[in-house]
Amino acid sequence: MTTIYLVRHGQASFGTSNYDELSAHGETQATVLGQYFKTILKEQPYVVAGTMQRHLQTAEGALKACFPETTIHRNPAWNEFNHQQVFAQYEPRFKQPELLKADVAKEENPRAYLAKIFAGAVQRWTDGEYHHEYDESWPHFKHRVETALQSLCDELAQSKPRYAVVFTSGGVISVAAGKILQLDAAHTFALNWAIANTSLTTLRLVGNEPQLLSLNEHHFIKAVNPDLLTWI
């Protein structure tokens, strides 16, 4: 029976012109993840990653610490939605990521403020009235992720590896979990906000159907250093 680990990428570069790059913190998180994989995976996994830089950097950093010879199968179907566009369509000022970062930094509770902005932006994106204003609408993103998940499950049901690891993003993981749990958009993205960097969401493959075993495991990060735990 195959166990699938969905990994959210390490901390990226929030509020910069290139979000799609791991911070120094994110690189450390990837190493810690790889060290944890070395203790729990008894053989080399089948590895898939989205094609975003932060996905590949996390995959490479983690695998270097456990299975350095593993091939990374790249698949853009596991890429995140364009969160910067989703923010900008909600508030045009946020077309400049540094302005969002500056607003967040001024708040007494930065994470709560960003959660409020994120919720409003996602609500607009998932509202059917505005689908035409986005490069990738919510229905298209949802369909892409659900198709990617089922295609992977079909592939693994044939090849039957003991483990598979997918390096991706929080929105993708939320949609995958939401599909299994039959959640609506609002509850799906409530999950998204809680998913920590380099956390694990674990699925078990029964036939070619995924079952959710765990969501957002990040105890292994806290055990090394609680200050490494991030969500942004």
Image (cartoon, grey):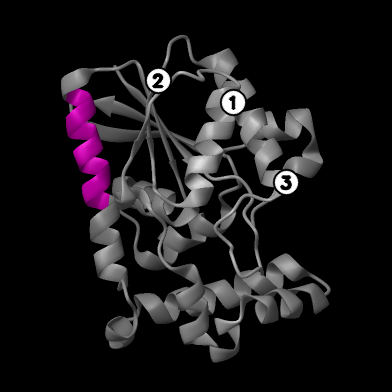
Query: At 31% across and 21% down in the image, what residue appears?
Result: 2
Which quadrant of the view contains residue 140?
bottom left
Task: Identify the disc placed on residue 134.
Answer: none
Determine which residue is flagged by label 3.
Answer: 24
Query: At 42% across and 58% down in the image, what residue appears?
Result: 80
Dot 3 falls on a residue whose secondary structure is: helix
Report how far apart the C-alphas of labels 3 and 1 lie in the structure: 16 Å
Residue type indicated by callout 3: Ala
Report how far apart the C-alphas of labels 2 and 3 lie in the structure: 26 Å
In the rendered structure, the answer to whether residue 107 lies left or right of residue 114 reads right
In the rendered structure, the answer to whether residue 119 lies left or right of residue 180 reads right
Q: Which residues are magenta?
A: 146-157
Q: In x, y percent, where is residue 13?
A: 65, 59
Q: In x, y percent, where is residue 64?
A: 57, 24
Is 156 a magenta residue? yes
Report how far apart the C-alphas of labels 2 and 1 lie in the structure: 12 Å
